[in-house]
Amino acid sequence: MEKNKISKKADSVQQVLSSNEKNIITLRKAKTKELLCIWSFLIIPLINLCIFWVYGTIQSFPIAFEHRFMDGTIKYDFYNFEYLIKTLSEPGNIFGQSILNTLIYWLLGFGFIMPFGFLMAFFLYKRIFGFKFFRFVFFFPSLISSVIIAAFFKYIFGPGGQMPYLWEQIFGIKDVMFFADSRYAFKTLLFYNLYHGLTGQLLYWLAAYARIPEEIVEAGKIDGLSVLKEFRHIAFPLTLPFFSTMMLLNFTGILNAGGPALLLTGGDYGTWDIPFYLYKFTTSGSLNDQGLAGAVGLFKGLIVLPFALLINKLVNRIEPVQY
Amino acid sequence: MKRKIFHKSKIRRTVPEKVIFTIVFLFFIFHAFLLIYPVVWGMLSSLKDVDGYFDNRFGVPVFPWKFINYIEAVKQITDGGMSFINMFWNSTWFAAGSAIINMEFVSAYAYVLNKYKFRGRNLLYGLCLFMMAVPLGASFVSTYRIYHALHLANSYAILFTATAVYGMNLMLFHSYYSNISNSYKEAAEIDGANFYQIYFKVMRSQAVPLALTLGIMQFIAHWNDYMSPLLYLSEMPTLATGLYRYQAYVEKTSLNYPVLFAGLFICLLPILVIFLIFSDRMMANINVGGLKG
């Protein structure tokens, strides 16, 4: 009797266990199925990442040290770096010129275009008369291809264009060659960057201002804050975290800054910059040139990396504003 | 609901404020003129004949305006054996294909990272942040060689590169999905929907406004891009690269500048139409999540 009871109990326990096991197996199957579904969404982007980011980054190192000989043999040494350093001391070398011009482009963007664009956006946010029209027109350069803008710019500044005529009327200097004279060419490209880029980040700045709660602005108005004081005491402090994040992130692009040398001057008359250098040496058709471009790319990465890590730390320290 | 872009309080300005606003207004007018003038000048020049262009470079074209230049542009502008229509098609598939593929993959990627817990999820999201903050990555030459080694260059297969999801768009989609309640997903699960039905029929449809805004911006960026096609689609030139190379040809031969300008305007037309249709959406949706502060 006692034995029967025990065996019945054991059977029911066995049944519960086996149904639990079945449940677990079903659950596991469902989980595995879900996991497969999840990875079906992830796999292609991850393959892309492995090819272009992981393999591409690894591959960048041997390319930078590639030294090809006439007989087709390849040696991995510091030839490219030695060559670049050697040319730096030569007057008028394009590598030094590229670094210098890139730093000037970056300085213009970081020191003037960004803060000035931020200020311009404030007046749009404050609904200056005609703000909808200005918003549309200022966004225009972001819409139009650089090929088109640069083409019009080129013919207006080029021989027989409006700018040489204006220059002659104002300064009395005849037939100024804005793109074909080393006294003017780089300055003209800087002007182009200023002209084209001043409102390039307008949408981001407007979005940052749009996040300021209206109640705070209204409270400031009741307290008698003028528009300038509103900018100083409300708008600027509240958008500072975003603004400073953008400024700091701009540091990471320090050696990526460039102008429209390809579109306007072809690099002539002292207008080389790092992106143009990389483009030219990569597509020249010579594998030796590609080695040099690889060395410049690696040099660029190594210079910017510690900067980027430091800046990342600084950005993480910026506290989001609590409204 | 339309998002607030401009502060809409009643505007009563003091005298010093009026002075400042007037100065800024005048500067805005000047800058707007500088931006509009080249485009208007280019448009007027596209309506001149060749002699009219050289004799009267600053002025308005004399009547009759040469609208025929636009037809001539379509007929004459070629690059590497590719006709204008071919280049237009290349621009279309490159820009639209890249934008659609990228949006689909970014949205799906952000969705699973946000709504499912699985091993490696945090690593994948951390990697996204790392890649945005640290400018490591393949060098220009390395990428160039990979494109050619995989035969992605000069082929429709180049659209595979649009499956790269890491960057600002992923952050925006991630933030967007985190604002969509999980109860939609759970309700669909109770109703017996499978993983793909939940995503495609329930969740993805809610992210369409963001996908449309970012997709339009991507389309514009790819349509205008001349550097990537110059490097990787040299035998399948897009309008931007074709016009760039045709411009060099015109400069060497001093041929028909008005036709070149007409070609530039045809290239601009689709973007202008898209912008005029979607400008409010683009302006409004840019502040969807993602801004620190």
Image: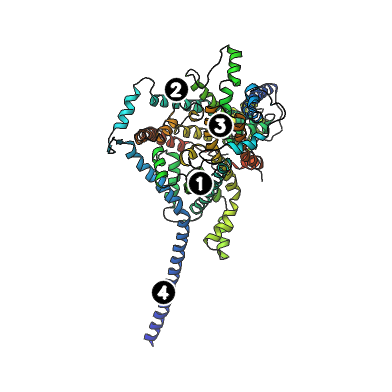
> Which of A184/B167 is in front?
A184
Query: How many numbered badges does the structure rendering display?
Result: 4
How far apart are the two marked residues, 1 and 3, measured between alpha carbons? 28 Å
Q: Earlier in the sequence, mark 4 or mark 3?
A: 4
Percent across and percent down for residue A169 are: 61, 13
Q: Quadrant of the C terminus of chain B?
A: top right
> Which of A174/B179 is in front?
A174
Q: Residue furthest bottom?
A: A1
Q: Earlier in the sequence, mark 2 or mark 4?
A: 4
- Looking at the rendered image, the disc whose residue lies closer to the viewer, 2 or 4, is 2
| Residue A102, image quadrant | top left
Name the residue tied to disc 2.
Answer: A270
How far apart are the two marked residues, 1 and 2, measured between alpha carbons? 39 Å
> Which of A227/B263 is in front?
B263
Q: Chain of mark 1?
A: B
Say what amino acid the circle numbered 4 marks: Leu
Say what amino acid the circle numbered 1 marks: Leu
Q: Chain of mark 3?
A: A
Percent across and percent down for residue B227 are: 49, 37
How far apart are the two marked residues, 2 and 4, measured between alpha carbons? 81 Å
Please tell me whether mark 1 sits on a helix, a strand or a loop.
Answer: helix
Name the residue tied to disc 1.
Answer: B170
- Looking at the rendered image, the disc whose residue lies closer to the viewer, 3 or 2, is 2
How far apart are the two marked residues, 4 and 3, measured between alpha carbons? 63 Å
Name the residue tied to disc 3.
Answer: A237
Name the residue tied to disc 4.
Answer: A17
